[in-house]
């Protein structure tokens, strides 16, 4: 029997969170964990108001990074569901399509993947409504990551991912050497690849948010760039 769990890292996502959760529920049965770093209680209030079953909500009280929120959520999933065998992360802003969940889960198990990435940069994938500046930045970031880290994947930075339990346990114990933000996405790929885990990619449609504001800013971009350099140096010195 397949036991599925989804972690949704959230930061000021009151406009999107319930719509996403309901869309997930229409497609698959699973436990959902929301890790909210908002300093206000708006997201918590709307979740409480809707009384959603099989959902756990955690507010960490401060912005500690998307990557660390996912690792926190994975710890909670494994503690809650001892028999879990597929752990999923997806963004709260509806950029990742819940309609792809069932197809991706089937692919994940059929191919015995440890990490399956919903990739924006393989054949038949799409990116919708992103401004040119974000497209260029994302593409350059992935080219740089592939050049420095050398892992044969096409999308280092999309957070629509499916993990085996053993892969999730590994990243919980080994990751977060480069800060708690988006750079953990690249760190996860490197660590799992170096340790011999099976990494796969599947086509995905990424849609830019239509409600709320993105948390991506110059500080995060700066931190991610230097995080890649740090990962490269750690790899070269066999400290990862």
Image: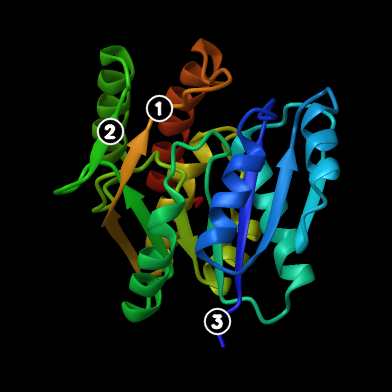
Residue 92 in picture, x, y percent from top left = 58, 38
Q: Do the residues labelled 1 and 2 touch (CB within 8 Å)?
A: yes
Q: Name the residue under label 3.
A: 2
Residue 205 in picture, x, y percent from top left = 31, 43
Q: Is mark 3 on a helix, strand or loop?
A: loop
Disc nearer the start of the sequence (1/3): 3
Q: Mark 1 points at which residue?
A: 208
- Going by the picture, which residue comes out furthest to the left? 123
Question: Would you place residue 49 above or below residue 72 in this image?
Answer: above
Residue 124 in picture, x, y percent from top left = 16, 48
Observer-nearest residue: 69 or 166?
Answer: 69
Q: What element carries label 1?
A: loop
Question: Counting other residues with Cα less than 10 Å from the Cα at mark 1, is it few (<14), some (14-19), or many (20 or more)?
Answer: some
The answer to which image quadrant residue 196 occupies is bottom left
Distance from the alpha carbon under mark 1 to that under mark 2: 8 Å
Question: How is the rendered protein coloured?
Answer: rainbow
Question: Would you place residue 113 above or below residue 93 in this image?
Answer: below
Q: Name the residue under label 2.
A: 127
């Amino acid at each position: 029997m397949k036991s599925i769990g989804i972690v949704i890292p959230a930061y000021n996502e009151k406009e999107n969170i319930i719509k996403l959760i309901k869309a997930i529920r229409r497609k698959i049965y699973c436990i959902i964990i929301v890790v909210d770093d908002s300093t206000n209680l708006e997201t918590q209030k709307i979740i409480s108001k809707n009384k959603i079953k099989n959902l756990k909500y955690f507010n960490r009280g401060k912005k500690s990074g998307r990557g660390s929120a996912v690792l926190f959520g994975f710890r909670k999933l494994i503690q809650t569901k001892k028999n879990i065998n597929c752990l999923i992360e997806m963004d709260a802003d509806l950029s990742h399509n819940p309609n792809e969940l069932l197809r991706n889960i089937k692919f994940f198990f059929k191919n015995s993947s440890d990490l399956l990435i919903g990739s924006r940069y393989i054949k038949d994938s799409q990116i919708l409504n992103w401004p040119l500046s974000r497209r260029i930045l994302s593409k350059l970031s992935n080219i740089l990551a592939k050049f420095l880290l050398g892992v044969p994947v096409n999308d280092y930075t999309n957070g629509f991912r499916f993990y085996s339990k053993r892969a999730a346990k590994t990243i919980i114990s080994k990751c977060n050497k480069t800060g708690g933000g988006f750079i953990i996405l690249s760190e996860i790929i490197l660590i799992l690849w170096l340790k011999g885990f099976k990494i796969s990619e599947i086509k995905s449609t990424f849609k830019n948010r239509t409600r709320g504001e993105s948390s991506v800013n110059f500080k995060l971009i700066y931190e991610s760039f230097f995080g890649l350099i740090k990962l490269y140096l750690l790899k070269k010195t066999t400290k990862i």
